[in-house]
Image: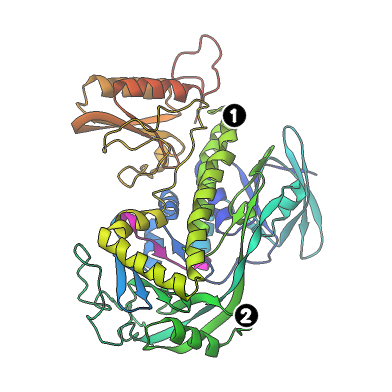
Amino acid sequence: MTRHTTVLVVGAGPCGLAMAAQLRRLDVDVTVVDAQGRPHTGSRAILLWPPVREVLDELGLAEDAARAAVRPAALHYHLGSGGSVRVPLAASDIPLVLPQERTGQLLAQALADRGTTVEWGTRVSRITPTADRVRATLTREADGAQEEIEADWLIGADGLHSSVREALGVEFSGARFPATFLLAEGRITGTTDPAGPGAADTGGPGAADTGGLGAAHTRRPGAADTGNLSTQEIHYFLARTGVALLAPLPSGEFRLSGAVPAGTAATAEHAQALLDERSPGGLRFTEVRSVALFSSEERVAHTLRSGRCFLVGDAAHVHSPIGGQGLNLGIPDTRNLAWKLAGVVHGRLRPSVLDSYDPERRAVIAQTLEATGRMARQAVAGPVAGRVRNLTWKLLQVTGVLTRFYAPMLAGWRSHYPDVLFGAPLPDPKRRTQRSRPRPGTRDPRWTPRPTDALAGRFQLFTHGDPAGPLAARAAHLAADLPDLIAHIPSDGGQEHFVLLRPDGYVAASGGADDLSRAGRRLASLVPALPSGTPAGEGRSR
C-alpha cells in the first residue's frame, strides 16, 4: 500500500528539521526521513546569526537556544604586526555560539511538539516526479524493507552528497577550495595579550567598556579557568603565516580552526603548533578533546527547483566555512520556501509564487559566496598580502566601517532579493527614500516580523501616524480584503508611513498612502482568483 504525505523532507540535519518544523507550524502535513540511523552528532556549524535566530524565535526556541549558547559581545582581530581591532556587536548583530548537535536537538523537539518525528535509518532509493506529485521508494536500512510513498512536494535537505539532487539530475558546479583546514576543540588557558590585561586596543571611541581583554568574561558555573582569555569574544588571529579562528563554546571549551600546510596531521601537537604560530602567544591547550582535518568546496546547484522538488541547505550550495555562514544561508532557504509552499498547499497563494524561490535565494547565495570568498582568500594570504590586509583592517576600524557595515553583513542584514515575487519591477532603486523607510527586497533590524503563531505565514503591515488617519484606514481595508494574507499592525505617532514585511522578514514595500495602494495591487496578484460573487475577505481558509 502506498503512503501519502503532503511534503516529504529528505534529510534531518538542521535545515531539514527547520523546514519541517516551519511547515508544521503552518499546518502542513510533513514526513521526514534520514538515511542515518540516529541524529547527527558533533559541533560542526556553531555560529547562528540573526537570520537563524529569527527562525528559532518563530518556532518558540529562542529562550532555550539563548540559555544553551554563548553570546559573544565582539569580534576581536589580533593583527600579526601588533595591536588588535575589536568590533563590538550591536544587539541586532549578536550571534549565538551553539554546537550544531544542540541546534538539531532543539529543532527536532519543536517538530515533535507539533506531532512529527524523524524516520531515522530510512533512505530514499528512487524518486519519480510527475506533474502533480512525486513518488519515492523508501528503504529501511535495518532490514532492507521497502515502502512506496507519494508526496505532493519533496524537499531535498540531504547535504553535500545529496541523493535527491543526484536523482533529479541537477548539476552541482563549482570547485574545491585550495586549502586544508585543521579544526580542534578543547580547553585552553592563557592570554591573547602577552603584555598583560588592558594593553590591547579595545576598539576606540564608541567601543563597549570591557576594561581590557578578558574583563567581559563571565564564567559559567563549573567552567574551566581560561586565564585572561575572554569567552565573550570570537578571536581571529591575522598572523603573517595565516589566519586562525578561536571561538568560545558553551561547554567552556574553545574551537580553533585555520588553514594548514600540506602534510599537517590531525594531532594535538599540530593543534598547539597552530595556536603558537598564529596567536600572539601565551595560549595553551590543557586538553584537546577532538582534532580533525577538513577541506571545503564552493558549489551551487544549477537549479534549486525541479518541478515539485526543491533543494535547500548544503544540497543546494556549499562554500568556505570562513565567516560562519553555513546554517545562516541554509536555514533562510527554508524560511523563504516554507511560507510560500504552505500558502500554495492551503490555496491562499498562486502556485507561481514558488517560481520566486530559486532567483531570490540564488541572489543571496551569490552575495554570500562573494563575501566568504573574500574572507577565505584573506585567510590564506601570503606575507605581503597579509601586511596589506592588516593595514586595511586598521583603516576600516578608524573609519567605523567595521561596525557600520562589516558586522551587519556577517549578521545577514546586507542580503537582498531581486524583485521577482510580484512579477513587476519596483520603483527606480536610485530613487531617494527616507531613512525611516527600508528598501523593498532588504532586511532591516528595525523591522522584523512578530513571531506569534497567530501571524504565521502572513505579510505584516505596520502603519505609523494617526491611527484614525487615511493611511491606517486604507491599511485596515486592505487587511480586511485579504485576511489570510495580511495582518495590519497599527502604531500611533510619528510621520505617517508604512512598512510591509514578508513572512520571511524581507521588506515587501514601504512608503506612504500612494505606495500602499500599489503594494495592495501587487499583493492581490499573489492570490488565486475567487469564484464570481464571493464577498471580499471570504472564500479562503487559513
State which region is magenta: 92-102
Give the residue drawn at x 32%, y 24%: 475
Can you give x and y, in whole percent of width and height, for residue 250 in the image?
41, 73
Q: Is residue 30 above or below residue 340?
A: below
Give the residue drawn at x 43%, y 80%: 253
Can you give x and y, in whole percent of width and height, for residue 138 in the image?
76, 53
Q: Is residue 113 visible?
A: no
> Judging from the image, what secondary structure is the residue with disc 1 in?
helix
Task: Name the residue furthest front.
Answer: 384
Mark 1 residue type: Ser
Total numbered labels: 2
The label nearer to you, 1 versus 2, is 2
Q: Are marks 1 and 2 in contact (CB under 8 Å)?
A: no
* Mark 2 burial class by Cα count in 10 Å: few <14, some 14-19, many 20+: few
Disc 2 marks which residue? 262
Mark 2 residue type: Ala
Q: Hey, which quadrant is residue 430 in on the image?
A: top left
Q: Is residue 125 above or below residue 44?
A: above
Check residue 319 for magenta coloring. Answer: no
